[in-house]
Image: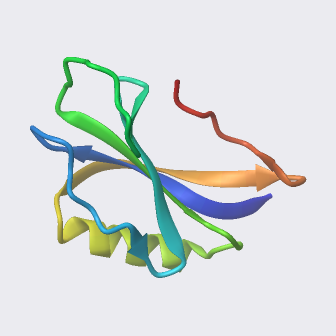
Amino acid sequence: MKLVGADIYIWSEKMPDLPKEIGPFTLLLISNRGTKIYPPPAPELEFNDWWRCRYRAQREVSHADIQKLLDAVSQKGVWTKVQKLFEINGANAYSEPY
């Protein structure tokens, strides 16, 4: 099992404005209610105030790297939950949004 990123859940009344790159991580997507909003195009939806922001690295990362990612995201908004993303035998062990 290899740690490769994190889904960070942010509380915000509008889509959070987050850095596209933080350390080894790239912001791959932002979703709301299970639907991908970023990168565009986004469907017409009524959004709630809880956004999932997926950061992923191209290499294995450490738990300390995830903590640095959370520290950086904390400068931009209030995160409420984090879910670490793992690969198992080269396959994603996490789901993709709609």
| Picture quadrant where residue 11 is located | top left
| Picture quadrant where residue 63 is located | bottom right
Instruction: Give the residue at the far left of this rendering.
Output: 13
Please provide percent x and percent y for residue 87. Answer: 76, 53
Colour basis: rainbow
Nearest the eye: 17 or 51: 17
Q: Which residue shows up at 34% across the image and 22% down it?
A: 43
Nearest the eye: 73 or 81: 73
Please provide percent x and percent y for residue 7. Answer: 46, 49
Number of marks: 0
In which quadrant will I find the N terminus? bottom right
Instruction: Give the residue at the far front of this rendering.
Output: 41
Q: Which residue shows up at 35% across the image and 31% down it?
A: 42
Q: Answer above or below: position of 67 versus 92.
A: below
Please provide percent x and percent y for residue 85. Answer: 61, 52
Q: Which residue shows up at 17% across the image and 32% down it?
A: 49
Q: Which residue shows up at 40% across the image and 78% down it?
A: 68
Please provide percent x and percent y for residue 35. Answer: 42, 26
Q: Answer above or below: position of 16 versus 24.
A: above
